[in-house]
Amino acid sequence: MNRPRTLVRTVLLRVLLPVLAAAAVLVTGLAGLGGDRGSAAAADLTQFDPGMIISDAVFYDSGTMSAAQVQSFLNQKGASCVPTAGNTCLKDYRQATTSRPADAYCRAYSGSSSETAAQIVAKVAVACRINPQVLLVTLQKEQGLVTATAGKPETTYRKALGFGCPDTRECDAKYFGFGNQVYLAARQFQRYAAEPGNYTHRAGIVNQVRFHPNAACGTSPVLIQNQATASLYNYTPYQPNAAALRAGYGTGDSCSSYGNRNFWNYFSDWFGSPTQRAPIGVVEQVTSPSSGRIAVSGWALDPDTTASIRVHVHVDGKPVQSVAADRNRPDVGSAYGKGSAHGFSTTVDSTSGKHRVCVYAIDSAGGANSQLGCRDVTVVNQPPIGRLDQVTSPSAGTVQVSGWALDPDTAASIRVHVHLDGKPVRSAAATASRPDVGRAYGKGSAHGFTTSFPAAAGRHEVCLYAIDSSGGANTKVSCRTVDVQNARPIGRVDTATSVEGRLRVTGWALDPDTSASIRVHVHVDGKPARSVAADGLRPDVDRAYGKGAAHGYSVDVAATPGTHEVCVYAIDPVVGPNPKIGCRTATVVNQAPTGAVEAVTPGAGQFTVEGWVHDPDTTGPVTVRVSVDGKAATSVVADLDRPDVASRLGTTGSHGFRVTIPVTAGDATEHRVCVDGVDTWGGPDGRVGCATGVANVKPIGRLDSATVLDTGAVRVKGWALDPNTTAPIRVHVYVDGTAVKALTADVSRPDVDRAYGMGALHGYSTTLDPLTSGTHTVCTYAIDSFGASQGGTNPRIGCKDVSVP
């Protein structure tokens, strides 16, 4: 078994038979039986987890019920109990108890001449630090004592928790007695936790847990997740099989056991989840300490942990605040034994009027949250006050407003909104020092404001609004009228000309109301094209108007070739008209790019195109587009340094290009390569030039002679070259179709150099080994420098017949 031999309980009958009904007196209430559910509602056994029957937090929480609460529980569950002769209901049971000293597992227990079952359970729970609910459920699942309708005889009470009742013999009398059984069972639970290595079922590992005392019923692996579950298995070493779980409180099959199933069932039905409990707490106060504010305080804790949890505050059904319940509350710590850090106190903003405030305690493990309570509170909100001291127009196109504003509900600064002719134009913080306001209202001095904003010329109405600090109604303080003066900007369009394919527009613009630079907008053919600051130096404008020299502008505008109307507008820096200061007609001339294709150089599977391109409308580099055989191939920027081109064209910048065109491996055909320059200003491309390109030209050569020597050897002479390179290439010699020799054509041949301009080292001369008598055919092949993998071919360059005597 899984407990010390002297403590092993009789479980054989208990796991074989369920508790069927009150008539089955012989077996009613034994540990593994299906038991009468009494008034309990059916628990959902689909949620039964064999690895976590009960959490440690619940199992070892000794403060869940006082003796009075245990008695009330027994009265409720045993309300229908009418004892028959010789029987006693658990709610009425009393006995004398003995005192027990403290040991390694339990604190001291003080005996009494007469204690109720409820007192014994509550006192043992505190002494051995076991949840009294665990003891009550164990009493029920072992002997059915809690819900017995006819009471139980003393013979049942003396083995109330089945402690000291081995499978193979009668219960040991030294463990008899109700108080003895409750104390020793609770102490044994603590012993399991203190000495886990001494018992079969251990937490944190996979255990093979049996379904039944009959070994033939087998086992299944269970990862026991915590000590409390391991202790239940050490006390009752069987798990329910599928048939037992399907049966609820009833009978499964011949391999079903019921002890741990019934423990989970009764605990769930009587006390809620054995692995997770809902948070608890109290909403103690909900008040409105100041205008627009609600104060909420109380306490909240989760019985499954000593850590602080969070509470959520809802106002009128909407969440408005999340706060940690971590304030010191020694009274809560004393009452619940979960530490003192469980108080909360917070304030939230609210509008005036009556509101419903509800507080929810948030479960620490993601379970259901508890509504701690709801209260109604009335929030009073005083409207803000203030004064509009001055409304002036200190400069053209500008309005300045000053005054003060405060909210009687707070000493903090508030904001003001300024409206111009009924429309909001400025929001400002009333934070400037106003000692006079502080003395008058006792809310501090930081309530003044001064702000300004642009306005068009003419008469305007300015209104001031003080903004409520807590979202209440805003106060319209007062309104004033003000006259705003604003001179129109002036200026001139001096020139509009075509430069490098663009329109260049110059002139000046200023606002008589300021010496600061203003902006101008350039329109082309009636459409806005550019915005630029008129801040270039124009001393002539300064001499004429006395507003400084920084009023000139010069701007380039993109435009298509042709004639255009260019108009310029001077932009008023404040709110005013933006007059047109002039228009000009200009014709854009766009010159096409020019250039040259200077070389097309063959290469392995590619050829390279080189040249230059220049757009007369710019000194910058130009993009070139390359096409091969009429199809677009690639594009590249012509930005390679070509000082010769720049010198010849009388320009600056880099204008050279080099681009490599890949072709199919082995492609030795001629291709038509054309290059176009892309116009800088969007005009048509300019054709730079076209040329013929070949990726790989075949080697060429000649077999000049094949002469038979007296020895029967043959001397072979000739030349070979690859037009793709000036380097010597290889030559292969064949006799009668069989390769007999390979050599390099590197003998000097000035005649070949004169003919092809590829250098002189292209001749070859070699002597073949003696041949057999008769006629033979000698052939030579020029070997391509690129090789077959790069598309090279090895042409035959000559054959001669020779006769060997």
Image (spheres, helix red, strand yellow):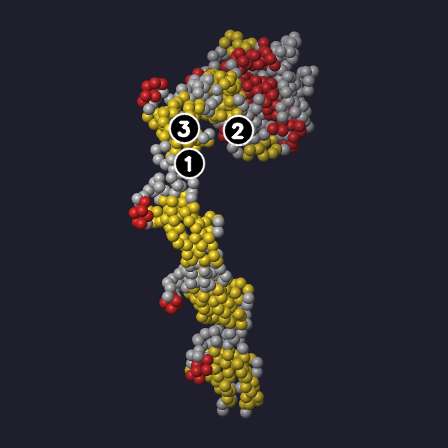
Residue depicted at x 42% and y 63%: 616
Q: Which mark is residue 481?
A: 3
**Could you tell me residue 730's position as x and y percent?**
48, 77
Q: Nearer the viewer, residue 15 or 766?
A: 766
Residue 632, compared with residue 477, is above or below; it is below
Amino acid under label 2?
Answer: Gly
Q: Are marks 2 and 3 in contact (CB under 8 Å)?
A: no
Residue at point 48% right, 76% down? 722
Q: Nearer the viewer, residue 795 or 302?
A: 795
For the residue pair 652 and 161, the one nearer the viewer reads as 652
Numbered disc 1: secondary structure: loop
- Pointer 2 or 3: first along the chain: 2
**Which residue in the protein does label 2 denote?**
366
Residue 206 pos. (x, y %): 55, 34
Q: Earlier in the sequence, mark 3 or mark 1?
A: 1
**Where is the N terminus found, in terms of image quarters?**
top right
Which residue is at 55% across, 90% downward? Answer: 803
Q: Which residue is mark 1?
A: 456
Tell me if residue 800 comes above or below residue 790 in the rendering. Answer: below
- Is label 3 in a helix, a strand or a loop? strand
User: Which x, y percent locates residue 508?
Assistant: 37, 48
Q: CA distance from mark 3 to mark 1?
A: 14 Å
Q: For the residue carrying disc 1, how many other residues have a C-alpha within 10 Å: few (<14), some (14-19), or many (20+)?
A: many
Task: Tell me the distance, in whole angstroms, between the alpha carbons under discs 2 and 1.
Answer: 61 Å
User: In the image, what residue occupies the spot 43% across and 29% down?
Assistant: 461
Say whether residue 488 is visible. Answer: yes
Identify which residue, 350 or 428, lies in the foreground: 428
Badge 3 crowding class, 10 Å Cα cut-off, few under 14, some 14 to 19, many 20 or more, is some
Which of the marked residues, 2 or 1, is nearer the chain's N terminus?
A: 2
Element class at badge 2:
loop
